[in-house]
Image: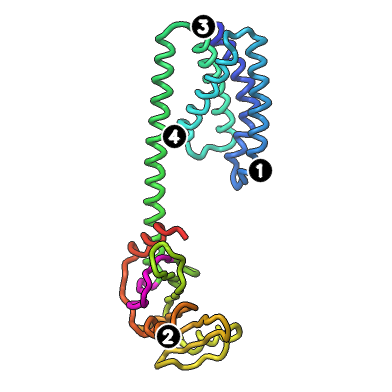
Amino acid sequence: MTRDLVRGGWVGLVVGAGVGYPVSRLYEEDIETYTVLPLVVVAVAVVGSVGVWLAVRMRISRPVRGAMLAAVLLVVAKNAVELAVPSPGPWPAFGGFVVLAVVSCAGGAALAGTAALLPRVVAAVAVCGCVVTTATVEHRRVEASGQRLRADLVAAYEKSLPLVVPAVVPGRVLVDVGAIDDEVLTLGYARDEGDEPDVFVQVSGGGDPREACAAWEPRFGPCERAAADRWLTKKKTGGRQVMVAGVDGRLVQVDSDALSREEALAVAGGGLRAVSAEYLVELELRDGR
């Protein structure tokens, strides 16, 4: 067992040095992962084969079984360490990978070559413990990341976006929420929660509805007054229309080819109701459109 442990360590040194460099490049700043992954795959295939060949040449007991066990130990150990140190630099990542490869290959060779039950039980318990711990920590990290994202979005919404939605959108439910330039709230409405939006509403700060409608004229046609502070422009074909209105000190634009003129006027003239940033963020994260 001792002989296999030492010789496995030497094999691990070769494997770690050969695979460690391309793996360490994954931790470089501003690296595009897809440019490095092919190099990692090639290094694993080539250096892994060399490692097995070295294990055979060095007369390690059960070299193939030891190599398979070493690979499992290395992956588990790397995942566990990566959770503890999520963003190491390239050189620390390289050094750490070499150390893990030495330990994993030494342990794999020793365990594969021994007939004693206790070392195998200890190794199995250690691997299972690492897997469970890694999964638990990763789950908690994902939860914490989601909570931070939600908190950041809520803060961004509260900072500059108008936290209001149309009081009336006939036959529709709110299914999509977003923002433009962190100042314009965009809302998508559909007949049912699982449908694609067919009514699109933008709510922004105060402005002149006539001027806002005029911005659509090059693509649609002349604006016409639909009611007080409400202007309508529509395409000659397709039925798409845009209603622009001043509502409660806000500028509201209703864009749809599914609403009638009266329904669009009801959306633009039905007033606005206040909502919380948490409500809008929950819709945005839940839908993920």
* 171, 150: nearer the viewer: 171
Precedes in sequence: disc 4 or disc 3: 3
Precedes in sequence: disc 2 or disc 3: 3
Count of marks placed on residues: 4
Which residue is tagged 1?
A: 35
Residue 115 % position (x, y): 47, 6
Q: Nearer the viewer, mark 4 or mark 1?
A: 1
Residue that appears at 46% across and 66% down:
196
- What crowding class fits label 2: few (fewer than 14 Cα within 10 Å), some (14-19), or many (20 or more)? many
Measure how far apart labels 4 and 2 are at the Cα level: 54 Å
Q: Is residue 253 above or below residue 67?
A: below
Q: Is residue 145 above or below residue 193?
A: above
Callout 2 secondary element = strand
Magenta-colored span? 162-177
Measure how far apart labels 2 and 3 are at the Cα level: 82 Å
Precedes in sequence: disc 4 or disc 1: 1
Give amino acid for label 4.
Ala
